[in-house]
Amino acid sequence: MSPNASGEITQPCGASLIVVDPNGRRNRVPVYPFPFSIGRAPENHLTIRDSRVSRIHAQIALDNGEYYLEDMGSRHGLWMNGAKLQGRVALKGSERIEFGVPDGYHLVFATGSEELQKLISRPSPGDTGRAGANLEKLRAVLEVGRSLQSAFSIGDVLNTVVDAALSVTGAERGFLLLFNKQRELEVQSARAAGGKDLPADDLRVPRRIIQRALDSRKDLFSMSFHPEDGVDAGNTVNMLDLRSVACVPLVRVNLRGLSDTQAINLTRNTEGVLYMDSRVHVVDLAGGNRELLQTLAIEASTVLENARLLEEERQKRKMDEELDLARRIQQSLLPKALPENSWLQVRGASVASHQVGGDYFDVVKLSEDKFTAVVADVSGKGVGSALLASFLQGAFLSMSCTTYLPDIISRINDFLCVRSEGGKYATVFYSTLDKQGNLVYINAGHCAPYLLRRDGTIETLETTSMPVGLVPEIPFIVETRQLHSGDRLVLYTDGVTEAENEGKEFYGRHRLKEVLAAGAVLDCEALYRSIQQSLADFTQGAEQSDDVTLLVLSFNG
């Protein structure tokens, strides 16, 4: 063997390097020409694709038939057989050469074909073989299952999922990214091989690239950042010196009403992505690794869906608690005690179909000889109607000192027309009754009350005006009736006449009138209970869609 013009020996010799990647895969590289350079830069005779390896890390020289290994001023040093290399050291054969970084490439030097064959077939330190590697992957997947049972936070489970994905693929780094409300990817878990946390900003790959690949992907996809692939990765990615990337979409799973977990629409229901990359070697997607990754993706998506459902349940419980508080407040605003004196007795109640209702009633003493009674029903259901009902109560109470009914109703009507949103309005029956039996009332679109005379005659107090909150500055017509001792006034909302049984049949006004006719001689308490019992017998506990309010006034003046 003789040197060429540049001093390099170009004739092949019997020396070889066994290159062992971090996954234990082996490759033979002949050692020539000399000096034989090793490093990260592509101009080396042996290029190591690991950013932690120096550009020109080491070289092997041939001098007088002897091989020598030399450190070329590397950043992390050069190690031979577990000891850091000092100066120039002779190579005899079977030496293990490392680059001063954990979990990286290592080399084994061989001089003859017999020795080379032994080294190729011999497992490298830390390599437990294919069976051991598969067992380790299975152990990583099982660890995810254990984490689901014992972890205290969703973050712990997601970290375990990323760790398992790194173990399966042999990738160096893993990131689990989820979409926020603006459909932008945010890092939720960042891990390095070996179970180490990484800063979220260590990803450094522009999210737009991952997003672009995600939008056009299949169930599993990989990305390359080499210019010849036509991907404009930007300087940031090029600086990372990435060799391989694999991504697994996280698709929302449907856990409601299904016997099995099922993935739904891939495009519109993507939760995020499990991203893995490697600077040293290609991410391993061979064999059953794809299936394992997809299993891990389903587990992660299931965890996220469970967390979302738990958050929904927590929010629902919180809302139910707030609505229950609102219900208690609303019930507390109803009259604590109804009149029970020599000339007027009143019985009544309001039952909301939901936690809070839009019905309202009240009976207020104006003087020793006069009371005012009001029943209102706000359109719609739920919180908005309940708030408006509470407003009506406050308005009627604040203006009860004014005895001229049209003024009160007109002011409330004009206020609602200006301030109320969403088309809310209310039907109202507003009245005053004095000791002489003078009933003065306005029926603003409300269910027509019944005046049950002592002799059994039933009179209907039909509407006199439109509901409040619909049209501003409209007149409200006042009507009067003369009550006699023993007469009863029955006020109600449409939740009574529209109460439904299991067959979706309405209770109806005719049944209410039948109960009144049969109870012509009953006193206030007995008539009220008779109507309530008739309603209960009809509905048989069926869920009602509207609030039920009933008020019975008995005049004994």
Image (cartoon, rainbow, N blue to C red):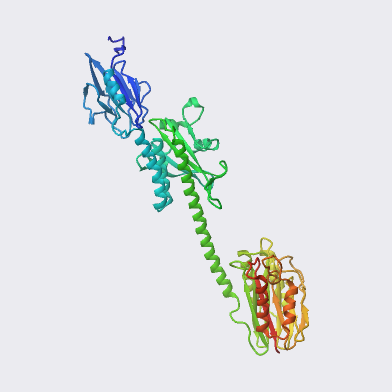
Report whether residue 264 is seen.
yes
Where is residue 550 shown, x and y percent of the image? 67, 76
Q: Is residue 55 above or below residue 192?
A: above
In the rendered structure, the answer to whether residue 337 lies left or right of residue 49 reads right
Which quadrant holds the C terminus? Answer: bottom right
Where is residue 303 shown, x and y percent of the image? 47, 49
Q: Is residue 98 above or below residue 60?
A: below
Q: How many marks?
A: 0
Where is residue 265 shown, x and y percent of the image? 57, 43
* Residue sitting nearer the eye, 538 or 499: 538
Q: Is residue 236 above or below residue 197?
A: above
* Residue sitting nearer the eye, 109 or 399: 109
Where is residue 125 shown, x and y percent of the image? 28, 32
Report whether residue 401 is seen.
no
Q: Is residue 49 above or below residue 34?
A: below
Q: Residue at x 46, y 27 (%)?
A: 226
In the rendered structure, the answer to whether residue 547 lies left or right of residue 137 reads right
Which quadrant holds the N terminus? Answer: top left
- Quadrant in which residue 519 is drawn: bottom right
- Quadrant in which residue 92 is drawn: top left
In the rendered structure, the answer to whether residue 378 lies left or right of residue 50 reads right
- Quadrant in which residue 445 is drawn: bottom right
